[in-house]
Image (cartoon, rainbow, N blue to C red):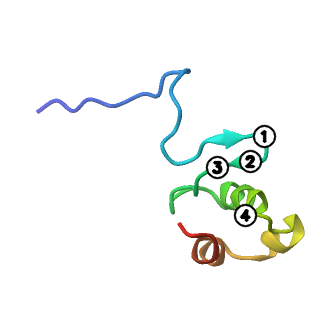
Amino acid sequence: MLLRRHHKRDDEESPHTTETEDGPATAPARSASKAEWIAYAVSQGADQADAEQLTKEQLTEQYGG
């Protein structure tokens, strides 16, 4: 059986994160990097330094992943 892989085109947006001027508009996937979760938390009003102190698991629990 052949499996096709989907390769995102340059004009195609990711279903998990949509960048806005303020940062990601939707929560990243649970599998996203900690850096993506920090960026999302900051876009939701968290302080950058405070978000960096949290674990990825804490970020996903607090910001809804």
**Residue 34: x percent and y percent?**
67, 62
Give the crowd class for mark 3: few <14, some 14-19, many >=20 residues within 10 Å: some
- Tell me the tag on residue 23: 2
Tell me whether circle 3 and circle 2 mark residues in contact (CB < 8 Å): yes
Instruction: Nearest to the eye among marks 4 and 1: give it.
Output: 1
Instruction: Return the residue nearer the eye: 34 or 44.
Output: 44
Alpha carbon separation for disc pair 4 and 1: 14 Å
Instruction: Return the residue nearer the eye: 63 or 10.
Output: 63
Q: Which residue is mark 4?
A: 41
Residue 13 vertical position relative to residue 62 in the rendered view, above or below = above
Give the crowd class for mark 4: few <14, some 14-19, many >=20 residues within 10 Å: many
Q: Which residue is mark 1?
A: 21
Q: Earlier in the sequence, mark 4 or mark 3?
A: 3
Instruction: Return the residue nearer the eye: 33 or 49.
Output: 49
Instruction: Nearest to the eye among marks 4 and 3: give it.
Output: 3
Alpha carbon separation for disc pair 3 and 1: 9 Å
Q: Residue at x 36, y 30 (%)?
A: 6
Q: Residue at x 60, y 75 (%)?
A: 57
Q: Is residue 48 left or right of residue 34?
A: right
**Residue 2: x percent and y percent?**
16, 29
Q: Is residue 17 left or right of residue 40?
A: left
Tell me whether circle 4 and circle 3 mark residues in contact (CB < 8 Å): no
Tell me whether circle 4 and circle 2 mark residues in contact (CB < 8 Å): no
Q: In what element is the residue under mark 4?
A: helix
Q: In what element is the residue under mark 2?
A: strand
Q: Quadrant of residue 61?
A: bottom right
Q: In what element is the residue under mark 3?
A: loop
The amino acid type of the residue labelled 1 equals: Glu
The amino acid type of the residue labelled 2 equals: Gly
Q: Earlier in the sequence, mark 4 or mark 1?
A: 1
Q: Residue at x 67, y 49 (%)?
A: 24
Q: Which residue is mark 3?
A: 25
